[in-house]
């Protein structure tokens, strides 16, 4: 994805993220993928995951 395309995405941080230094990831969703980037480097590298892959990761990461 180009930087221009990336700028068009609606990026957001977790509601659990604070403002204590910006060590967060940001996520943007599209119909085909979930995009993830470092909030401190918004024009840097990004990852993209299929919707189902992201859902599986979130389910695993939120297990007690």
Image (cartoon, rainbow, N blue to C red):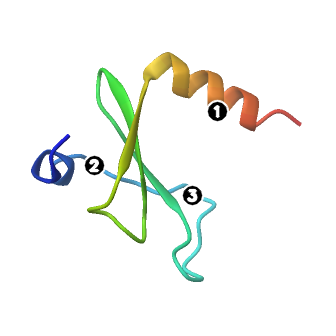
For label 3, count other residues whose C-alpha is less than 10 Å away and answer few (under 14), some (14-19) or many (20+). Answer: few
Q: Residue at x 45, y 21 (%)?
A: 51
Q: Earlier in the sequence, mark 3 or mark 1?
A: 3
Front residue of 45/50: it is 45
How much space separates mark 3 and mark 1, taking CA atoms? 15 Å
Is disc 2 in contact with disc 3, using a CB cutoff of under 8 Å? no
Q: In the rendered image, which quarter contains the C terminus?
A: top right
Q: Is residue 21 left or right of residue 42?
A: right
Judged by depth in the image, the label closer to the viewer, 1 or 2, is 1
For label 2, count other residues whose C-alpha is less than 10 Å away and answer few (under 14), some (14-19) or many (20+). Answer: few
Res. 58 mark: 1
Q: Is residue 19 left or right of residue 28?
A: right
Q: Residue at x 16, y 53 (%)?
A: 3
Disc 3 is placed on an element classified as loop
For disc 2, the marked residue is 10
For disc 3, the marked residue is 15
Is disc 1 in contact with disc 2, using a CB cutoff of under 8 Å? no
Is residue 56 placed above or below 10 in the rendered structure?
above
Q: Is residue 5 left or right of residue 58?
A: left
The percent position of residue 28, horizontal first and vertical second, equals 36, 43
């Amino acid at each position: 994805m180009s930087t221009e395309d990336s700028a068009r995405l609606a990026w957001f941080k977790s509601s659990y993220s604070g403002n204590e230094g910006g060590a967060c990831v940001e996520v943007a969703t599209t119909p085909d993928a979930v995009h993830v980037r470092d909030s401190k480097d918004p024009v840097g590298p990004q990852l993209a995951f299929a919707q189902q892959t992201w859902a599986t990761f979130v389910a695993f990461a939120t297990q007690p």
